[in-house]
Amino acid sequence: MKVNIGIVGFGEFSESFLDIWLQHPGVGKVVGAELIADRRKHISETYGIEMYSSYDEMLEKVPELNCVGIFSQRHQHGPMVIQGLKSGKHVFSAVPMGCTEEEVMEILKIAEEKRLIYMMAETCYYFPCAVWCRENYQAGRFGKFVYGESQYYHDIMDMYGSFSAQGDNWKRIAGIPPMYYATHSMSMLFSAIDQYPLDVTCFGYEDTEGDGIYGKGNNDWDNPFSNETAILRMSGGGIARINEFRRCGNVRPTSYITGLYGDKGAYEGSGNQHLFSRNVPQNGEFTSETVSDEINTFNFVNNKGKMREEDGRTDYFYMMGFSKIHNLKRLPQNLLTIDQNAHVNAVMGHNGSHIFLVDDFVRAVITGKLPPVNPWMAATYTITGIKAHESAMLGGKTLKIPYVGKAPDDWGTIDFDEKPY
Ligand SMILES: NC(=O)c1ccc[n+]([C@@H]2O[C@H](COP(=O)([O-])OP(=O)(O)OC[C@H]3O[C@@H](n4cnc5c(N)ncnc54)[C@H](O)[C@@H]3O)[C@@H](O)[C@H]2O)c1
């Protein structure tokens, strides 16, 4: 069996996956759909794939597709994912899962009933700081989770490209509540400690810029907040702090864990410096080590060698390529050097995570097993953000987070020792 995938939406993001789909050994046919004619032309001329003028047209004209990839704008995913699942396709989708609790729950229901793969392509799940914290937390080095903080900082005026397909109406969409796009921050922390949130209190920073993006009547959600901070009580009793800032004097990296504290060990990250300490007074143990060498990336694209701690860079190239903590053995080996013949540099963007995500999806579809970020995890991250914004709109009222359930016991997760393609 091969993955035959139809990709929907060719704005800024999906092109950085296209060389990977085309070169992955488990992928057969790749076609695309895009509403904007110039974008369609660019993709068909550059990659030589068939392009259709809409999602509907693609579904109708290419019945042999068994999968779709949703890369439309962030507020459009829910209904398009549901359409894909209802037409019997496995779905790979950019984050977030949806913008309402109902959309998210419907995706879970259809995917479970039909046993179709729904995978939210969460790039931050494979960010090196997240992988490092996950592996070391699960190895017991932190002890029990006490407190953690992660964030996604991206100024809205630096994101115009992501809303340009909306034309003159772009501000109506750009003003989406920051917490509706909190899956990056949440996935890094929650997957490391394998817990889910029970309650949320969130406050919003009411925007004062006056440029017509935020504020009642300006956007489709009547959202006044450009920055939001949530405090969450987690299922194991610890506390998480999530920041989603869209007017913020911060440069890249945009998403990272600043601190993860257990009762025995603590990770702290700042730019290219990553530290881990242990403090177990009862055993006389007190150690502190630099773990930057395992987390900082090898900048394959510019062939500059490993990012060094002292470089202190926080710009875009910080996020290019793999790091030592990544398990490269599980990937198809032809993809490790894909940057050398790729059409765009961004193929190695988001710390090489695009390659891991495509490989997760291909393995899941071929084996019928769940990807590491399974639909219930994606639903937890997405619905928590939706509830956080609701809390902010209520002046910080503490709200319960609905429990979305978990993967059925008889639906296992992919095993990276298997060679399914
Ligand atoms: N790190 C990450 O995970 C990450 C990074 C960047 C973007 N994203 C997400 O990826 C998605 C795409 O981002 P982008 O910046 O490329 O957005 P974009 O607006 O530039 O591109 C979306 C494209 O989808 C097309 N489209 C919409 N409806 C369609 C339909 N029915 N048929 C065919 N085409 C359709 C639009 O014409 C547009 O060109 C967004 O949801 C964004 O949030 C995720």
Image (tube, rainbow, N blue to C red):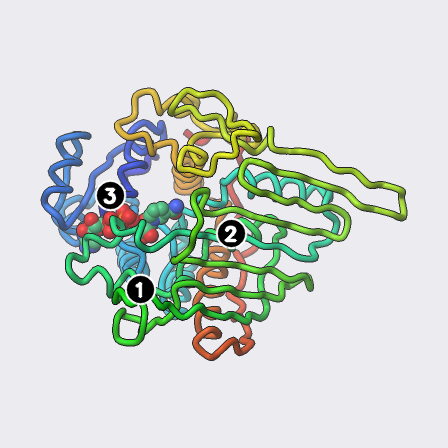
The CA distance from mark 3 to mark 1 is 29 Å
User: Of the residues shown, which amino acid type is indicated by label 2?
Assistant: Ser
N-terminal label among 2 and 3: 3
The CA distance from mark 2 to mark 3 is 26 Å
Residue plotted at (35% across, 71% down): 223
The answer to the question of whether label 2 and label 1 lie on touching residues, with beta carbons closer than 8 A, is no
Q: Residue 399 in the image: x percent, y percent?
A: 54, 76
Where, by quadrant of the figure, is residue 336 drawn? Answer: top left
| Quadrant containing the N terminus in the rendered view | top left
> Is the residue marked by circle 2 packed among few (<14), some (14-19), or many (20+) residues within 10 Å?
many
N-terminal label among 3 and 1: 3
> Is the residue marked by circle 3 packed among few (<14), some (14-19), or many (20+) residues within 10 Å?
many
Q: Which residue is mark 3?
A: 6
221 or 386: nearer the eye?
Answer: 221
Q: Is residue 188 left or right of residue 83?
A: right
Q: Which residue is mark 2?
A: 187
Q: Which residue is mark 1?
A: 175
> Is the residue marked by circle 1 packed among few (<14), some (14-19), or many (20+) residues within 10 Å?
many
Q: Secondary structure at mark 1?
A: loop
81 or 130: nearer the eye?
Answer: 130
Q: Residue 245 in the image: x percent, y percent?
A: 43, 58
User: Of the residues shown, which amino acid type is indicated by label 3?
Assistant: Gly
Residue plotted at (49% across, 49% down): 373
Residue plotted at (44% across, 30% down): 321
The answer to the question of whether label 3 and label 1 lie on touching residues, with beta carbons closer than 8 A, is no
